[in-house]
Image (cartoon, helix red, strand yellow):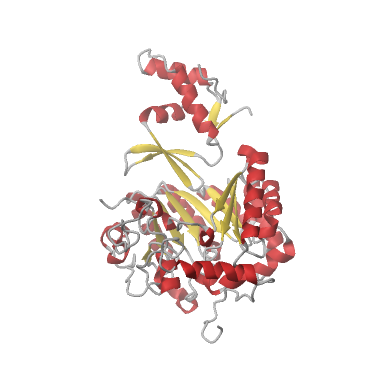
Amino acid sequence: MPTPNPLLLIAELSYTCPLHCPYCSNPLDLGSTRRGEELKTEEWARVFDEAAALGVLQVALTGGEPLVRKDVEVLSRTAADAGLYSTLVTAGTPFTRKRAEALRAAGLDHVQVSIQDSDQVESDRVAGTGAFARKLEAARLARELDFPLTINVVLHRLNLDRVEQIIDLAADLGAQRLELANTQYQGWAALNRDGLMPTRAQLEAGEQAVARARERLGRRMEILWVLPDYFEEFPKPCMGGWARDAILVNPFGEVLPCQAATTIPGLLFENVRERSLPEIWFESEALERFRGTDWMPEPCRSCPFDRQEIDHGGCRCQALALTGDASATDPVCHLSPHHALVVEARQVGEAISAGGALVYRSPRPLAGRY
Amino acid sequence: MTQPTVRKPRLATGVRLQWDRVRERHVLLYPEGALALNATAADVLELCDGVRTIDDIAAALSARYEGSPVGDDVAQLLTAIADRGLVIDADA
């Protein structure tokens, strides 16, 4: 099968962030000593032009916190000029009126604000800083300026009991979309898995709250419920398939299939400073490694449910994290020989009453902190 | 005859109609999504300016397609796209 052209560019502008969420999808090594190596404005502009030529239609300006950079306004303009539909994914705290108006004028299309919880104390506790009030202000400001607004909330055992209140809050803020993303155990969330793991009863109650709200709100607000993959029978179609629909460029210019792929040993990810994005997309060995279905092991290869093109083999980073082998069947699949690892992790969630201690995201080196 | 749910259609806030030069077709772009359009759908959506009524749009296209009746197709298409929240009534 010929390599498809990607639809989405995830532009991780910087790993710096004012928040310390213990489920952050950024790598454990936030590269704080490499800040000087972050791509420059004109390098990102070239990446956007090359992405558009490659068929990308959407760009997510994300991080970390993208607004720690002063050039997001310029980059929004560049994205608009390239014909890309742009989304700013922000913690909200640096989304001031001045910057919001400048972003509007620059052609930014859509704003996504993260909120940690509907309860101020709990939200600030998980963010590791007092940010809740400013997040609400940012969301209201986005609506005032007529940006379409998505509220994004990562769900875990500490906030799943308030799904109903979270939905009400997002609706009050005037959001068009609410993304309820059950924690994916990558990056910092892998480190904090036991403390974040919900119970099945929490998830069921959360899902029921979503169903009731969809009924009540209709088209006024779209609610996305990102499935808790440890609780599913089949693995999630991670990123819609390895290097298939999405392409990610990290703050230092490395081209990846997803946020976590640098954890996989033996893969050399190429840099936009060395080659053009289209050349890397079509020729990089690392992006080719798990593309399509030829790489799949058993039991995927002879999947009795014919799900090779549905699940795309699940998540390679998860296979690595759980089994030590990135090419293994995703252990979330009930047919995986390692599925017991996922069952055990769920049982930890059922067994502990108050959740474990959490390690908060921090730029300090992690050595010695385990 | 389909009863359309919108009278004076316009693209919803944050929805954009655009030519996809790589795949050579029109697309509707919206928050974290894209909908590929065939040429007829793109012709209809280009006329959704919040001023023209569905009847105006059907008449304009019928004239363009040399008199073929298109009213039902236009109403069906816009109802389907309005159901996804991508087109709304300008007066609503």
- Quarter of the image holding residue A176? top right
Image quarter of residue B38: top left
Residue A31 position in % (x across, y down): 47, 76
x 36%, y 30%: residue: B39
Disc tally is 0
Image side of residue A319 versus residue B79, left or right: left
Identify the residue shown where x is 48% and y is 71%.
A27
Using the rendered image of the protein, determine whether residue A22 is visible from the camera's viewpoint: no
What residue do we see at 55% from left, 64% from top?
A65
Task: Choose top left, top right, bottom left or bottom right for residue A116.
Answer: bottom right
**Image vertical order of residue B74 relative to residue A179, above or below:** above
State whether residue B64 is above or below residue A171.
above
Residue A331: x and y, percent?
44, 65
Tell which of A143 and A341 is nearer to you.
Answer: A341
- Residue A328 drawn at (x, y percent): 36, 67
What residue is drawn where x is 43% and y is 55%? A237
Q: Position of residue B62 (x, y in %)?
A: 41, 16
- Residue at the extreme bottom of the image, as rendered: A368
Work out which quarter of the rendered image holds the C terminus of chain A and state it. Answer: bottom right
